[in-house]
Image: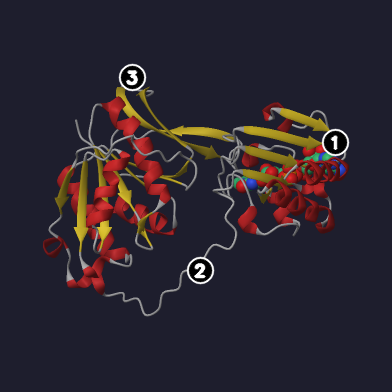
Amino acid sequence: MNNLFVYCEVENGKVADVSLELLTKGRSLAQQLGCQLEAVLVGYQLDSLAQSLFEYGADVVHVADDKRLYPYLTLPHTAIVNALIKQEQPQIALMGATTIGRDLGPRVSSALHSGLTADCTSLEIGDHADTKGNEYKNLLYQIRPAFGGNIIATIVNPECRPQMATVREGVMKKEALPAPKKGIIKKADVAKILNDTDFVVKIIDRQIEERKIDIKNAGIIVSGGYGMGSKENFALLHELAAVLGGEVGASRAAVDAGLAEHERQVGQTGVTVRPKLYIACGISGQIQHTAGMDQSAMVIAINNDPNAPINQLADYAITGDVCEVVNKLIKYYKKNSK
Ligand SMILES: Cc1cc2nc3c(=O)[nH]c(=O)nc-3n(C[C@H](O)[C@H](O)[C@H](O)COP(=O)(O)OP(=O)(O)OC[C@H]3O[C@@H](n4cnc5c(N)ncnc54)[C@H](O)[C@@H]3O)c2cc1C
């Protein structure tokens, strides 16, 4: 049975979280398919990074290690990944929907005529019967919102290989194995694969902006929506978050209204979060928002509309004016927390 590839992105000398999340998911997909999970690592000085991928269940790590392969460059990375896919013929190839994945994925898939589903929110294995009566077993269900997020579509690719998909950071869980797998490292013959023409584009200057706001890893998120009404009211959420030791998130409507920075946006076109506690303040709970927070361990909704859709997802729904409730919470926690 052909294997499952995960392209592992290297970021500041580390494997990107999204790649580890995909390896974690890939582990269960590969188990269902009865195939091997194979990581593809492209860059420079990769020995310890390659070993670390066995902790996430890789059976094989394909390593393309060459000074010219770091930092990322479109053409050489495409050449390496294409060559490995042609050689190993995986049935599935996954990568992060990051800046690099969004550059690399379409190039690889168009060169291989395989197609690609971008920004999947879920991946599953299942069967498919087409309208001509053909039946296909064990396809990759590439699940993502479609038509402006109004439906969740399941996309299958019965005929072309590999079945390719990208997934955004934070959508899937990252989980190392209790003990690393005893896998093997296969070194790619980089010199044979690369051509001088792969280096016609040269990097003159490279600047990576540090993320100033990081809500993805927050344990508690106090998130505000359009119902907060004003910047002054929104500031209350910063106060509550500070008292609780959490971060502030926002809906797109709040971001569009200038109440919060874009980095705080939770949802389909924002960040996907899974905190222990998510407090949704003045947020209606449209699917594009809940797609980014419905994996939170506990959700508290504060809304003056008892029928707001967010209440259906919430563990606790507080009906009332958001500023009044948040002020009370700030007062209570200031008094009662150490
Ligand atoms: C392609 C696409 C992608 C999108 N991506 C995202 C995304 O990533 N993230 C996202 O959030 N949205 C996204 N959206 C937008 C989404 O559809 C909603 O429009 C948005 O989430 C609504 O934000 P909101 O809940 O803050 O505002 P509203 O829907 O306007 O809700 C405001 C809520 O506040 C309540 N309220 C008002 N006043 C008070 C008060 N005084 N006290 C208590 N409650 C009050 C109201 O009852 C209401 O429930 C996307 C849309 C599209 C089409």
- Residue 64 position (above or below residue 1): below
- Residue 265 position (above or below residue 134): below
Give the residue drawn at x 82%, y 41%: 332
Q: Amino acid at mark 3?
A: Gly
Name the secondary structure under disc 1.
Answer: loop
Lower position in the chain sequence, tag 2 or tag 3: 3
Q: Residue beneath label 2, please?
A: 209
Residue 224 in picture, x, y percent from top left: 74, 47
**Badges 2 and 3: C-beta atoms under 8 Å apart?**
no
> Would you say the beta carbon of the disc 3 residue lies within 8 angstroms of ligand 1?
no
Q: Amino acid at mark 2?
A: Glu
Name the secondary structure under disc 2.
Answer: loop
Mark 3 and mark 1: span between their CA atoms?
52 Å
Residue 31: image quadrant is top left
| 227 sits left or right of 143 in the view | right
Question: Alpha-carbon neighbours of circle 3 within 10 Å: few (<14), some, or many (≥20)?
Answer: few
Q: Residue beneath label 3, please?
A: 133
Lower position in the chain sequence, tag 3 or tag 1: 3
